[in-house]
Amino acid sequence: MIEQQIRTWNVLDEKILNLFRINLRENYVPDEYQALAFADIEIPINLNSSMLPPKLEAKILEELKPKKSMIALHVGTGSGFFSALLASQVKKLITIEIQPRLLFDAKKRHLENSIKNIEYVCANGFNGYFEKAPYDLIVYTASHIHEPPGIREQLNIGGKLFLLEGNQVIQYGKLITRISGTEFKIKNLFEAVAPSLVESWEPSKFIF
């Protein structure tokens, strides 16, 4: 899987590749899709959500360059696999998921795999999570039509925001780096298509 899928997107960082050897993706894939755990497809985890392909997960991590000193925010917990990858590379991760069942199952898998530096929030993550800002990294693993207002302002100076922006025909992976209090650097990374972020304008919010 690592050679055939991830390297095809020129992800050559051995540190990133090794994450996929340590974190077993099959532990996060629904039973009926076990045979496709490493396939270059979006694997459904319920009617509304799916896992990103491995090559896209790896490319996002390579662009973010996470460090052990960082505080990160991940919106769209899903199966919990990307959260597991990111948490292993940062000091603390806050992960937000609007669907309680997915968040509960993700936390259970993380604890089974001895991942303990994650805070779980069940909420609408459309506009990020102001309560614990600022962050060194913010990552959305579901897409937006347009970047929601106020997200980039939740970054520390030098912090990075990744999101997929566009419709369900074409999207761009976008990396935004905060240069100063008012200045941001924007880089379009690649074309991709991912499911839209599941939203609710009046969500209940609670922390696991």
Image (cartoon, helix red, strand yellow):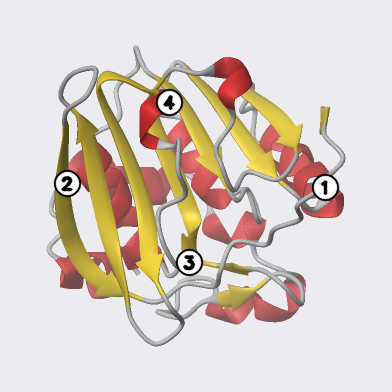
Q: Secondary structure at mark 2?
A: strand
Q: Are marks 3 and 1 in contact (CB under 8 Å)?
A: no
* Disc 4 residue type (three-letter): Gln
Q: Secondary structure at mark 4?
A: helix
- For the residues marked 2 and 3, what is the alpha-carbon distance in whole angstroms? 23 Å
Q: Please state which of residues 201 and 188 is positioned toward the viewer in this rendering.
A: 201
Of the two numbered discs 2 and 4 on the same chain, state the one appearing first in sequence. 4
Q: Residues within 10 Å of mark 4 (few under 14, many from 20)?
A: many
Q: Residue at x 66, y 78 (%)?
A: 33
Residue 179 against residue 186 in the figure, above or below: above
Q: Is residue 115 left or right of residue 172?
A: right
Of the two numbered discs 2 and 1 on the same chain, state the one appearing first in sequence. 2
Of the two numbered discs 4 and 1 on the same chain, state the one appearing first in sequence. 4
Q: Secondary structure at mark 1?
A: loop
Q: State the residue position of label 3.
A: 52
Of the two numbered discs 2 and 3 on the same chain, state the one appearing first in sequence. 3
Q: State the residue position of label 2.
A: 186
Q: State the residue position of label 1.
A: 202
Q: State the residue position of label 4.
A: 154
Query: What x and y, as percent, mark residue 161?
Result: 33, 39
